[in-house]
Amino acid sequence: MNPAAATGSPSPRPAIVLVHYGSPEMTRRCLECLVQVEGPDHWAVVVDHGPDPGLEQALAGAHPSLHVLTDHRNPGFGAGCNRGASHAFSALGASLVWFLNNDALLEAPILPTLRPLVEEHPDVALWATHQINGTRHEGTYVHQGWYRRGLRTCEYSAPPGCKVLGPSESLGGASLMVTRRSWERLGPWPEQFFLYWEDVAWSRRAHELGLPLVLMDASVLHLSSRTIGRRSRLQVFYNARNRLLLRHQIRPDARMARFFFGLYLVQKRIFQGRWDLLRTAWDGVRAGWRNEQGRDPRY
């Protein structure tokens, strides 16, 4: 039953969407942290991409308002976010979705600050927090001229304590928020990447529409690539392929620039001494040159 239908109006409760893959321990720890830090006044939607069965049982008792959606085909991170958001908006009546990586942790509550901000600034496309990644304080990614080609600066006054991104910047997808209104204007996450750079492409779509992107003065703890492993074959392949894939989508005419950028991605592994990843990086570069999309059966 739709909770919104029971009350006759949309639920004011936000939903937090986690895309799960791998061991349930990280996802369970994230859910328990959400209850401890944020309290129980939100929905938790976990999209289970496997690979093992039994996640719902493994997460039992971790969150009082938990919904587990199972799809062990693993269609990719963007597709998982879209399924979770669609469930939150349509089935639960949520007015706000917070996409949070399942290996992230909170030190302080964020929703009490976020909820009034989104009500006061309904024109913002996407909100995000900083990410504390070891010694690095992340939250936005800065790109070169290929990314901002054709984009204009969004003239929007930043809310107190926040930053409005320029056309060379994108928000990080490990802690990203969207309202129902902005979801309908912006459209869903790009699904063609399978893994990595979906957040960069989604941010660019907002830039193209002239919609503001806002970084809040708040943070989550997130050590990147813990789920699949830093510099794993999966990470190296999709990171290389998708960087070229996005460049192809933005500037399909810049073939020579993509060629030399692909060579740069391969030679990085040589200088790192990672000969074991050289073939993987080359596979990713070739797939990017060919504009191949979605999940690659080799990885």
Image (cartoon, rainbow, N blue to C red):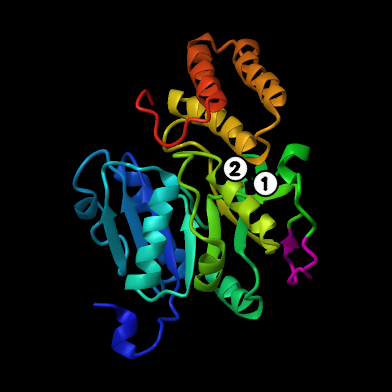
Residue 296 is situated, as x and y percent measured from the top left of the image, at 39, 29
Kindly indicate whether the residue at mark 1 contacts the one at mark 2 (C-beta within 8 angstroms): yes
The local crowd at label 2, few if under 14, some if 14 to 19, many if 20 or more residues have their Cα within 10 Å, is: some
- Tell whether 239 sits left or right of 145: left
Tag 1 residue: 137
Question: Does 135 sit above or below residue 121?
Answer: above
Q: Residue at x 56, y 67 (%)?
A: 185
Q: Using the numbered discs, state the Cα–Cα distance from disc 2 to disc 1 in whole angstroms.
A: 6 Å
Q: Which label is found at residue 73? A: none
The residue closer to the viewer here, 104 or 240, is 240
Rendering coords of residue 286 (x, y %): 53, 20
Query: Could you tell me which residue is drawn at 54 percent across and 62 percent down?
Result: 177
Outermost residue, front direction?
Answer: 253
Element carrying mark 2: strand
Residue 139 visible in the current orientation: no
Q: Is residue 156 magenta?
A: yes
The answer to whether residue 254 is above or below residue 94 is: above
Q: Quadrant of residue 274?
A: top right
- 28, 11: nearer the viewer: 11
Residue 187 point in image, percent of width and height: 51, 60
For mark 2, what is the residue? 133
Q: State the extent of the magenta-drawn residues as a range.
A: 154-164
Compared across the picture, whether 224 is left or right of 62 comes to: right
**Residue at horizontal 68 percent and vertical 64 percent from the top:** 211
**Who's the residue at 32% across and 64% down the image?**
63
Residue 115 drawn above or below residue 213: below
Q: Residue furthest bottom?
A: 8
